[in-house]
Amino acid sequence: MTQPVPMTEIWRGPMAESVHLGHAVICASGGEIIEAWGDPATTILPRSSSKMIQALPLVTSGAARVHGLTSEQLALACASHNGAAIHTERVNRWLADLGLSDDDLRCGPQDPDDKVAHKALLCSDTSPCQVHNNCSGKHAGFLTLNRHLGGSAEYIDPDHPAQKAVLDAFETVTGETSPFYGIDGCSAPNHASSLHGMARAMAWFAGAREGVDSNQTAAVQLWQAMVAHPELVAGEGRACTELMRACKEPVALKTGAEAFFIAILPNRKMGVALKITDGTTRGAECTIAALLVRLGVLDADHPATRKFMNAPILNRRGIETGMIKPAATLV
């Protein structure tokens, strides 16, 4: 099958009012497909779901060790955070440790998604900074790598040594030559692969073992940092954070813009990648929850699961009018 298939349905009364179509792949650590829906060969941009790949050179180069980065900082390097104080304070300290400031970032300012931080900016009549950008942790990682490599200040340039190292890591773990890149919301290059390639990469992370080589050691350190600090990877109320906390075993989860999602399952040496073709986040969140339930690492009745899968839809009077649920082929 080469066409997208139903992944998530929006029910109102007795009918499916809307359907989110997409593709999904579950891979074993050897790269072979265990299960697939839609077209595994479809070309995708993984967006922020590739952040742990983009962070690999930070560790494999020795930059993380030389600068004494903590697991919290490694988690932030993989994060799409809410811009809450727990995120921005840590990124600001990281920049200060490098002798740098907000002006050295190249991700652009962003109004924080965190309500407290958003209100604080409004009440103080203060504009958001680049550190509020959901990708500021990734960019602090790029700056750390850049300091180690001795590159120019424009570390987001596709021809910059830092981005060349990212591309090399991306092609290595996906097992593919990337056909092109797009410029992400944070201005860094985002490399394309097949959906199978991205699932293969996540399965490689899942099967990595510390001490085998520098790449595998880095992979273990990164997924362990994500699992150890789910609140830094996204934030309160976010699917990445809540579902990582709810899983019955270590699982690293990461969303990407335009309805992408990945999962790294180290205990099972499996990787998951999915794309909802209409770019709707609710479809991706419901689908990843359903796949985690299918794989036995998440309980369908866990309160966190029920926020994203089989979740009631309420109208403005609080009356339940429908439900968002996975397609029958996923459960």
Image: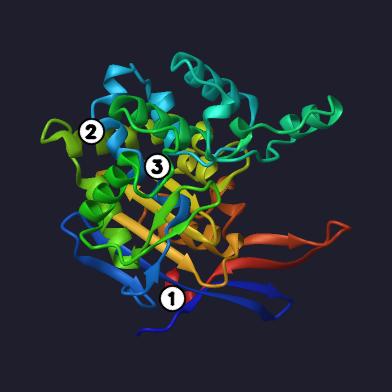
Q: Quadrant of residue 73?
A: top left
* Of pointers 2 and 1, the one earlier in the residue sequence: 2
Q: According to the image, label 3 marks what residue? A: 248
Question: Where, quadrant-wise, is the N terminus in this rendering?
Answer: bottom left
Q: Quadrant of residue 89?
A: top right
Q: Is the Cβ of the residue at disc 2 closer than 8 Å to that at disc 3? A: no
Question: Where, quadrant-wise, is the C terminus in this rendering?
Answer: bottom left
Q: Nearer the viewer, residue 249 or 147?
A: 147
Is 114 positioned to the left or the right of 331 in the image? right
Label 3: how many Cα within 10 Å (few below 14, some 14–19, many 20+): few
Q: Quadrant of residue 112?
A: top right
Q: Is residue 268 visible?
A: no
Residue at 28% x, 52% y is 170
* Of pointers 3 and 1, the one earlier in the residue sequence: 3
Total label count? 3
Q: According to the image, label 2 marks what residue? A: 60
Q: Nearer the viewer, residue 280 or 60?
A: 60
The relative height of residue 121 versus residue 216 in the rendered view (above or below) is above
Residue at 26% x, 39% y is 219
Q: Which mark, by number, is residue 329?
A: 1
Q: Which type of secondary structure does the marked residue at label 3 adopt?
A: loop
Q: Which type of secondary structure does the marked residue at label 1 adopt?
A: helix
At label 1, the amino acid type is Thr
